[in-house]
Image (tube, coloured by chain):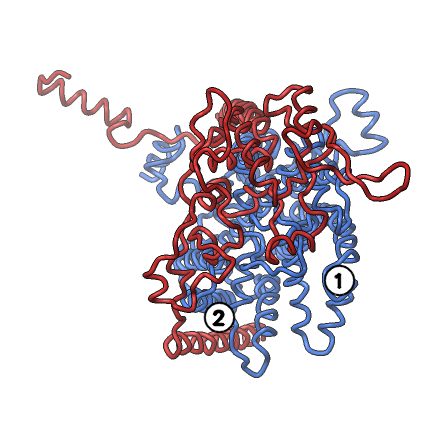
Chain colours: A blue, B red
């Protein structure tokens, strides 16, 4: 597809040829994830997480469709229908725990996938659209996960829906009407639950559609790689199948083992106990917290505590949206020609700070609100925005980057040609030099 | 252009955050948060070990049966168990006849199920059958509140999953009632336990509407071969029972989990071996260097021979 040396599909049997002549589906698969897709040979394990995200999307769709066969989207019946699934449906407990923890693992692998892209500069030309489509997928995932969390109609479902739809009321004039329009009422009620169920069922298929665009746009330039250097010739690549199918395959087994260990032995570890209490509009929980994967954004929202020109709540909501939307501009904010953080010593340091910063934000988002926690989340939020809006553009302008390897196949040598050259080349290279 | 915009946006957001930070710090210094009795005296749940803990945990059926007895004779007066059916008790080791007798004979389970009088259509009650769920002690929330000094006794079906700490929390709460410490009253006179509430340091706000349900050893008469019915034992038993009501498929889950994880580990190892196999040719082989370089080795050996050193 993308490179001239990509091997075209060759039907192995008459039947395959007959089929391929009429519907070139095998040809499509061969070129997309088969032997016809050349991939840089030096990918490390961070490159496994895209495939893993796809696997968890499938897990969510399959378990979700089965759950929807037993779920009942009524404010009086939803909570008990979930318990019916847990108690009476054959393997219903497994389906529900697989779905709830599948969401968590989907976010874990997607976060690693995103940070891999951030470190190795996978958002840079010519991959800007891949990055932006990925962000669209991430936004859709957040909306889907939020609506899914509302469906059991427990206390956190209800109050989470109350708080998150409440964001919109921060906007002057239009905010409150928008909130009421979204909910179909003044508070989350039957209308909200039914539409959330409908949309929660629809959105994964929209995600799957955008995933196709994401992969399609990926296959034009091909995968980035740990050096960030472009593929130059056939030596730099290996066919996706069997090399990366094998690598993805065993690693997927490892991650699925971790997932199943959580699913079967600690299925409620990532959830909140309050969601086992049926929704009660008259009793506000002591601490309303979103699911763990939203905690950094929750911390950003709560960090703005001063009415400075605009109300504090509006600052918080704007900053929370901005924290994701600014990532769409990243390819232009960081225009250093060097992609990989491995060759950008200053960038690398700030990247480590960013990772710690986001973890701190996550912690602060879930912690009980005390002045110390608020102060920490304010500093961490300030760093988050400073990192992307000020520090990255400055680094891109002033950083002295390290020399890049001349090619992917040469990069594996790290410039130590003589000591660690592949067998058979070392002596000849020395001899030639002499 | 985009950079100018980005610097400006970054500057504004950071500025607002720094002003917010200044406000937070000032507030914390000017009016530091007052210490509260809840913060000082609330205790984390005690440790509780149950047979169902851990990835291989199984229910102790004798304990669940004792727990059911404690629930029936003590808790059921106020707390419902509406997600559990009498028929589910088969999982505790009871046979069909025993369940029928438990639900419907009136000797064990006393609360009747709401029904309709077939002759008049008026509301009536009837004896429970195995297909019924445990009937609630009160017909509705208002009745429950009226009978309990305006407090609502929560349904216990999911209690061990609906509270931080789970079964250990339930056990701690049941055994945690005590006199309000004089120390507490001295420091926080306004935190005195109000009339009609009971001091319990394991409860979030320290004052619980539920009167101590387990007050004396032997309150419930356990059958032959059971441990003595101390308050501690009864609290443990009923907590274990509530783990079962909240997660009746726990054993199923543990058993399936072991099989699935072993299968996946096996598949992963096979996958890893095939990965190694497939990549064996593609991976760059590094030439031995330094002392491992065959040339150096030969040179070293020659030198050794010359010097007459062996080994």
Query: Can residue B268 be spotted in the picture?
Result: no
* Corner quadrant of residue A33: top right
Subunit of mark 1? A
Image coordinates for residue B171, horizontal then vertical, percent: 46, 41
> Circle 2 — which element?
helix
| Horizontal relation, residue B132 to residue A56: left or right | right
Q: Which mark is residue A183?
A: 1
Furthest-bottom residue in this view: A309
> Circle 1 — which element?
helix
Q: Quadrant of the N terminus of chain A?
A: top right
B30 up-or-down from A215: above or below: below
- Residue drawn at x 75%, y 46% is A77
| Horizontal relation, residue A220 to residue B228: left or right | right
Q: Which mark is residue B17?
A: none
* Corner quadrant of residue B31: bottom left
- Residue drawn at x 40%, y 43% is B46
* Corner quadrant of residue B309: top left
Q: Quadrant of the C terminus of chain A?
A: top left
A134 up-or-down from B66: above or below: below
Q: Nearer the viewer, residue A158 or B298?
A: A158
Image coordinates for residue A423, horizontal then vertical, percent: 39, 29
A391 up-or-down from B264: above or below: below
- Residue drawn at x 50%, y 29% is B221
Q: Nearer the viewer, mark 2 or mark 1?
A: 1
Question: Cα distance, mark 2 to mark 1?
Answer: 38 Å
Q: Nearer the viewer, residue B18 or A337?
A: B18
Circle nearer the N terminus (2, 1): 1
Image coordinates for residue B92, horizontal then vertical, percent: 59, 25
Q: Nearer the viewer, residue B114 or A360?
A: B114
Query: Can residue B269 be spotted in the picture?
Result: yes
Q: Nearer the viewer, residue A416 or A152?
A: A152
Q: Which mark is residue A390?
A: 2
């Amino acid at each position: 597809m993308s490179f001239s040396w990509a091997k075209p599909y060759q039907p192995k049997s008459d039947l395959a040829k007959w089929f391929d002549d009429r519907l070139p589906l095998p040809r499509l698969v061969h070129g997309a994830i088969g032997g016809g897709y050349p991939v840089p040979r030096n990918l490390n394990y961070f490159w496994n997480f895209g495939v893993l995200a796809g696997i968890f999307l499938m897990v969510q769709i399959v378990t979700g469709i089965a759950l929807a066969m037993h779920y009942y989207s009524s404010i009086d019946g939803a909570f008990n229908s979930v318990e019916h699934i847990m108690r009476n449906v054959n393997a219903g407990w497994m389906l529900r725990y697989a779905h709830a923890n599948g969401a968590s693992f989907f976010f874990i692998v997607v976060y690693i996938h995103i940070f891999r892209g951030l470190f190795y500069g996978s958002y840079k030309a010519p991959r800007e659209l891949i990055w932006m489509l990925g962000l669209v997928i991430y936004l859709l995932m957040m909306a889907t996960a939020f609506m899914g969390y509302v469906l059991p109609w427990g206390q956190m479902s209800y109050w989470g829906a109350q708080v998150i739809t409440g964001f919109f009321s921060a906007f002057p004039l239009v905010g409150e009407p928008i909130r009421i329009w979204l909910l179909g009422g003044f508070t989350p009620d039957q209308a909200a639950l039914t539409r959330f169920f409908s949309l929660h069922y629809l959105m994964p298929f929209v995600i799957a559609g955008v995933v196709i665009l994401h992969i399609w746009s990926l296959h034009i330039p091909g995968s980035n790689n740990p050096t960030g250097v472009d593929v130059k010739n056939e030596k730099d690549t290996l066919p996706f199948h069997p090399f990366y199918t094998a690598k993805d395959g065993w690693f997927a087994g490892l991650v699925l083992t971790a997932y199943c260990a959580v699913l079967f032995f600690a299925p409620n570890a990532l959830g909140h106990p309050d969601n086992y209490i049926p929704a009660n509009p008259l009793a506000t929980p002591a601490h309303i917290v979103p699911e763990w994967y939203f905690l950094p954004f929750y911390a950003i929202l709560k960090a703005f505590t001063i009415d400075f020109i605009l109300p504090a709540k509006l600052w918080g909501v704007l900053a929370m949206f901005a924290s994701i939307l600014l990532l769409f501009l990243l390819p232009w904010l960081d225009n250093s020609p060097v992609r990989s953080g491995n060759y950008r010593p200053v960038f690398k340091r700030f990247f480590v700070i960013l990772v710690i910063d986001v973890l701190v934000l996550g912690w602060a988002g879930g912690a009980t609100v005390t002045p110390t926690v608020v102060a920490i989340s304010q500093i961490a939020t300030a760093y988050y925005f400073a990192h992307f809006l000020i520090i990255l553009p400055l680094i891109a302008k002033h950083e002295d980057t390290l020399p890049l390897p001349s090619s992917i196949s040469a990069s594996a040598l790290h410039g130590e040609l003589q000591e660690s050259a592949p067998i058979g080349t070392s002596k000849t290279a020395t001899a030639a030099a002499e | 252009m985009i950079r100018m915009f980005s610097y400006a946006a970054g500057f504004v957001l950071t500025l607002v955050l720094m002003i917010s930070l200044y406000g937070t710090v000032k507030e914390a210094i000017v009016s530091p948060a007052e210490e509260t009795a809840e913060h000082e005296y609330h205790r984390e749940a005690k440790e509780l070990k149950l047979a169902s803990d851990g990835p291989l945990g199984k229910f102790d059926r004798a304990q669940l049966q004792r727990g059911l007895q404690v629930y029936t004779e003590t808790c059921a007066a106020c707390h419902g168990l509406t997600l559990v059916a009498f028929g589910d008790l088969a999982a505790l080791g009871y046979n069909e006849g025993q369940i029928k007798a438990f639900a419907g004979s009136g000797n064990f389970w006393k609360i009747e199920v709401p029904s309709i009088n077939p002759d008049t259509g008026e509301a009536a009650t009837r004896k429970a059958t195995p297909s019924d769920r445990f009937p609630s002690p009160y017909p509705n929330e208002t009745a429950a509140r009226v009978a309990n000094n305006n407090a609502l006794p929560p349904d216990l079906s999911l209690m061990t999953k609906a509270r931080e700490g789970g079964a250990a929390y339930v056990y701690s709460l049941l055994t945690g009632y005590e006199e309000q410490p004089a120390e507490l009253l001295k420091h926080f006179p306004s935190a005195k336990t109000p009339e009609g509430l009971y001091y319990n340091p394991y409860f979030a706000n320290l004052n619980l509407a539920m009167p101590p349900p387990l007050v004396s050893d032997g309150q419930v008469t356990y059958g032959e071969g059971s441990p003595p019915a101390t308050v501690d034992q009864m609290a443990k038993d009923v907590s274990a029972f509530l783990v079962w009501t909240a997660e009746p498929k726990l054993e199923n889950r543990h058993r399936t989990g072991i099989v699935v994880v072993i299968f996946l580990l096996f598949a992963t190892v096979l996958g890893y071996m095939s990965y190694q196999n497939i990549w064996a040719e593609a991976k760059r082989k590094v030439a031995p260097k330094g002392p491992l370089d065959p040339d150096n080795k030969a040179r070293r050996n020659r030198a050794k021979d010359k010097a007459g050193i062996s080994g």
